[in-house]
Image (cartoon, rainbow, N blue to C red):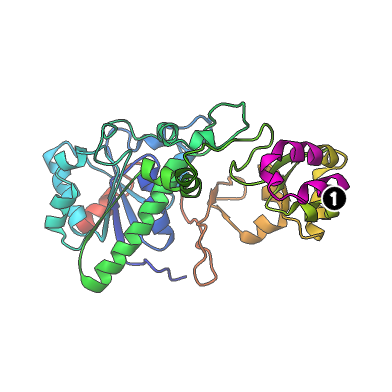
Amino acid sequence: MTLPLEGVLVVDFSQFLAGPYASLRLQDLGARVIKVENPNQGDLCRRLYLSETMIDGDSTLFHAINRGKESIALDLKSQQGRAQAQQLASQAHVVIQNFRPGIIQRLGLGYDAVRALNPSVVYGSVSGYGHDGPWTDLPGQDLLAQARSGIMWLSGNQNAGPVPVGLPLADLLAGATLAQGVLAGLYKQATRKQGTLVETSLLECIVDAQFELLTTYLNNGNTMPEREAEGSAHAYLAAPYGLYQTSRGALALAMTPLDTLAEALPLPALAAFAVKPQSAFSQRAEIRDLISAHLMTQTAAHWEERLTARRIWCARVLAWPELLDSATFKALDMTSDIGASSESRRLLMKSPLRVDGQRAPAQAQGPALNADCAKITQEFLN
């Protein structure tokens, strides 16, 4: 298949997650990504993971986010390494970096230096907290960005305290946001032959993810949202929104008028609350208790089938095995087996995008450190 970014060269100096996630999204659209790594063990992500599961000596995390890329090891602290890095950047359509503010400039690879070599370059930069303010030099790490963003007070139940999102959400949002900005820069590059500096940070992106709730907070007298005591899901949405335990499994209920739900369950006592619409906010706990007791009489599968047939927005809560075994997930075809044989299965996730009706396969795992040095040197550094 022909992808939209075929012919675009991305030189990626970033490591960990945010920058590499941006270049992964660009690669999924057809770009060629050259990953520049430290000769001393390479991207720290190669060794960063809790699981003992490895692929060719590197963490599964590294392969998940660097699949299909090329690797060259350059010592950016040496004169030769910096010169070669500048030579690569001078030929790239896109350069990406996520060093702490000031470091990339000292290495001679900041935007101004690269633009002097390559005026039409699209230069993507991710930091932890931007370039101004007292947090600038603090470590730009996902959990720390979550902690400073306020988002930890949105998940979990009322008495749970702050709850981190169980994903590197700040990194992923920053990478996706950077990729979006880079795509706009590539359009400018193609139509006007001009370069673009695209910048974002973990904090900006995880705060932006809360725009809906923050807008409410900023306009309601700065009243903090209140999480529910049980099954809390969205602090600003009325009952019955949230999670409910059943006799077997859990059920998620989304936005549903109380009178509609009362008829579908059926639960006549619930209809009394529907008479006063404001009660869906002011009496959330009472409504939840009523619904919870009723849903405990049957399984989540039973309620999902029954309520879906009555056009109630609900879903059974699935664990990974159930999701992966579902006909819907199989139809989406989101995994690639890159193993050499049926006995050596190595599954990687594919791109979430479909282009012209097709999803590009994950054709290769992440590169071994410096694996493409000879090819890249011959093509770009002679």
Disc 1 residue type?
Leu
Q: Please give left or right for residue 364 compared with residue 325 in the image.
A: left
Number of numbered labels in the structure image: 1
In the image, the segment drawn in magenta is: 265-292
Mark 1: secondary structure: loop
165 to 334, vertically: above or below: above
In the image, what residue occupies the spot 50% across and 62% down? 360
In depth, the one of 139 and 238 nearer the eye is 238
Residue 154 lies, in percent from the top left, at 54, 37
Residue 366 shows in this picture: no
Q: Please give left or right for residue 126 compared with residue 255 in the image.
A: left
- Check disc 1 and report the residue beneath it: 265
- The quadrant of the picture occupied by the C terminus is bottom left
222 to 178, vertically: above or below: above
Residue 299 lies, in percent from the top left, at 84, 43
In depth, the one of 198 and 340 nearer the eye is 198
Q: Please give left or right for residue 69 compared with residue 196 in the image.
A: right
In the image, what residue occupies the spot 43% across and 43% down? 206
Residue 102 lies, in percent from the top left, at 19, 38
Q: Quadrant of residue 279?
A: top right
